[in-house]
Amino acid sequence: MFLSPPEIQHQKLKSRLGSYDREDVDELLENVAASYEQVWHERDAARAQVAALEQKLVDYEDLERLLRDSLVTGQRAAEEVKSEAGKEADALVQKARRKADEIVAQAVTEREAIKVEIARLNGVEEDVHARCRTLLVGALEAIGAKGDEVSAARGRPREAAARG
């Protein structure tokens, strides 16, 4: 039987001629001893439970520290990766701009060369037109001169026939 402290304090023992009944006292002492033993075991169990909980707390604190360290390490790694990616992106953009500038410069050079070639071809065309014109004018003049000679030659016998 489990006795609480107030129950122990309020126990009434039978008395006989100025002393307590031995059986009642022995029974009370057995009950008090049993209660004390039970409390003692419960206290030991509670201490063991507290020790286990304290160990779990230490384990959780260690785990929390590891997780915090891992998180910080992960954040640093992410920042480094992000930084490296940014540097690579900047390098690629600069390379692309240089290549684009080279392509534009090459296109401008080619355009200027084409303009020079067009101007040269326009000059050649004008020269060919002038030569053709000169040739045709010369041919027309030659045809006109021969035509005059032919007309003149045709006209002379007619003149001679008309005279005679």
Image (spheres, helix red, strand yellow):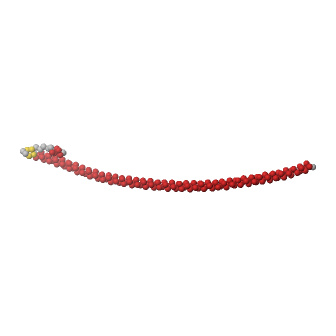
Q: Is residue 46 left or right of residue 111?
A: left
From the top left corner, tell me how far across and down residue 140 is, in percent.
Answer: 78, 52
From the top left corner, tell me how far across and down residue 3 is, in percent.
Answer: 18, 45
Q: Residue at x 55, y 55 (%)?
A: 101
Q: Residue at x 16, y 44 (%)?
A: 7
Q: Which residue is drawn at 92% across and 49% down?
A: 163
Q: Which residue is drawn at 45% across and 55% down?
A: 84
Q: In this view, does 150 lie to the left or right of 126?
A: right
**Residue 84, can we see it?**
yes
Q: Is residue 105 left or right of residue 38?
A: right
Note whether 14 is above or below 108 in the view shown: above
**Residue at the extreme right:** 164
Tell me the quarter of the picture where residue 116 sits: bottom right
Can you say which quadrant of the picture contains the N terminus? top left
Foreground residue, 32 or 125?
125
Note whether 5 is above or below 86 in the view shown: above
From the top left corner, tell me how far across and down residue 4 is, in percent.
Answer: 18, 45
